[in-house]
Image (cartoon, rainbow, N blue to C red):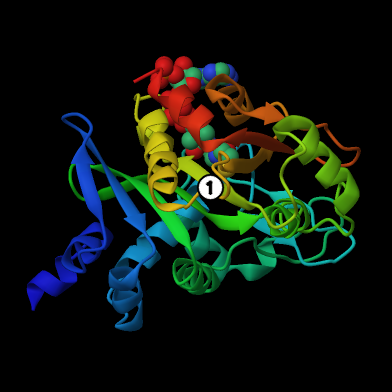
């Protein structure tokens, strides 16, 4: 019985046999998860709840800080100002403070109440439903147990990429930073005009490493693993390379790294801090391997 309480999220994954893990060095290993019958069965039987709970905490902890600052968001629809946490804070401690004094969280711009940017329970549910779709994940695991980073992505199409990366990407802003024709023009300018709107695309949705695991030569192998997995599993149409779309913030460290590994940024749009980045799976596999 005790064993059940001591189970970590990565033990969940190993018990359900949905993850392959390989050792990177003395400290880290990299896990890979792809959609398929084993993953569907484990989700059906709710075997991954501890994993989703740890993943949601890690997700919130990373995106609550610089450069994203997604900890609290103003509830007022025409404000939606965000406040972040300092690098040394932890979301679980901060959640306790917010719960004990909800009135203390007022928006610095308009003094309206703030709410959690990502509610823990809702995020667990969203991750659960994401993993029911065509998801690919790579995980950074420290000391064989501790979830310390992740990369998530899924198959989409050029057309759906607009919803995934532009409409959802700009999130709380009332109007997307670019129209669908502008997005199509940008996609074709960077990746070539022989893709149609139904062409398969890999949406490189998340790439995140915990503060303690930063700059430890683990982040590129982590993202390499998801691209290699996607390249292995997604069938090519008419022999063409699979395009990849990601997005990040203008001026961020991630944007510098994205360029280094082979992404081309799109144009910066007025009123938006986010920028779309485009590449192909083979180019990114090469770019991330280069520095191993
Ligand atoms: C983006 C993120 C995963 C990168 O992980 P990291 O541990 O900080 O990255 P590293 O310091 O290991 O840098 C990776 C490589 O890029 C290089 N690099 C670092 N900063 C760079 C920059 N500004 N420009 C170009 N290359 C850079 C490093 O030298 C390193 O190469 P090496 O391993 O060959 O030495 C991490 O910073 C993070 O989780 N950020 C918050 C979430 C986020 O913004 N994710 C991306 C968008 S979804």
Q: Which quadrant: the N terminus?
A: bottom left
Q: Is mark 1 within 8 Å of ligand 1?
A: yes
Residue 120: percent from the left, percent from the top? 50, 67
Q: Residue at x 37, y 39 (%)?
A: 225
- Give the crowd class for mark 1: few <14, some 14-19, many >=20 residues within 10 Å: some
Q: Which quadrant: the C terminus?
A: top left
Specify the quadrant of the image occupied by residue 136. Answer: bottom left
Q: Nearer the viewer, residue 42 or 118?
A: 42
Q: Is residue 14 left or right of residue 281?
A: left
Q: Nearer the viewer, residue 154 or 13?
A: 154
Q: Residue at x 41, y 18 (%)?
A: 290
Specify the quadrant of the image occupied by residue 227. Answer: top left
Q: Is residue 262 left or right of residue 163?
A: left
Say whether residue 85 is visible. yes
Height in image: 284 above or below 130? above
Q: Residue at x 87, y 57 (%)?
A: 110
Can you identify the residue that label 1 sits on? 206
| Dot 1: element | strand
Q: Residue furthest front?
A: 238
Q: Nearer the viewer, residue 166 or 213?
A: 166
Residue 77: percent from the left, percent from the top? 85, 66
Say whether residue 87 is visible. no
Numbered circles on residues, count: 1
Height in image: 204 above or below 50? above
Specify the quadrant of the image occupied by residue 272. Answer: top right
Q: Residue at x 71, y 45 (%)?
A: 195
Q: Is residue 204 left or right of residue 43?
A: right
Residue 207: percent from the left, percent from the top? 50, 42
Residue 162: percent from the left, percent from the top? 75, 54
Q: Nearer the viewer, residue 76 or 291?
A: 291
């Amino acid at each position: 019985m005790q064993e059940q309480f001591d189970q970590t999220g990565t033990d969940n994954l190993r018990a359900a046999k949905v993850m392959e893990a390989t050792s990177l060095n003395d400290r880290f290993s990299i896990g890979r998860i792809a959609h398929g019958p084993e993953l569907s069965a484990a989700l059906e039987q709710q075997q991954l709840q501890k994993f989703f709970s740890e993943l949601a905490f890690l997700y919130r902890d990373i995106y609550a800080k610089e450069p994203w600052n997604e900890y609290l968001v103003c509830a007022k629809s025409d404000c939606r100002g965000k406040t972040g946490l300092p690098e040394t804070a932890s979301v679980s401690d901060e959640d306790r403070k917010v719960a004990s004094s909800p009135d203390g969280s007022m928006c610095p711009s308009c003094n309206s109440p703030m709410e959690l940017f990502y509610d823990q329970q809702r995020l667990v549910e969203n991750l659960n439903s994401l993993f029911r779709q065509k998801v690919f994940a790579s995980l950074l695991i420290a000391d064989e147990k501790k979830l310390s980073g992740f990369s998530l992505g899924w198959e989409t199409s050029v057309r759906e990429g607009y919803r995934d990366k532009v409409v959802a990407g700009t999130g709380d802003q009332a109007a997307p930073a670019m129209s669908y024709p502008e997005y199509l023009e940008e996609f074709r300018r960077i990746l070539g005009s022989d893709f149609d709107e139904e062409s398969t695309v890999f949406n490189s949705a998340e790439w995140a490493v915990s503060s303690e695991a930063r700059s430890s030569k683990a982040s590129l192998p982590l993202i390499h693993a998801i691209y290699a997995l996607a390249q292995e599993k997604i069938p090519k149409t008419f022999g063409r390379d699979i395009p990849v779309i990601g997005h990040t913030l203008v001026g961020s460290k991630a944007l510098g790294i994205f360029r280094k590994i082979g992404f081309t940024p799109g144009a910066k749009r007025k009123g938006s801090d986010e920028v779309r980045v485009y590449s192909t799976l083979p180019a990114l596999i090469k770019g991330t391997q280069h520095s191993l």
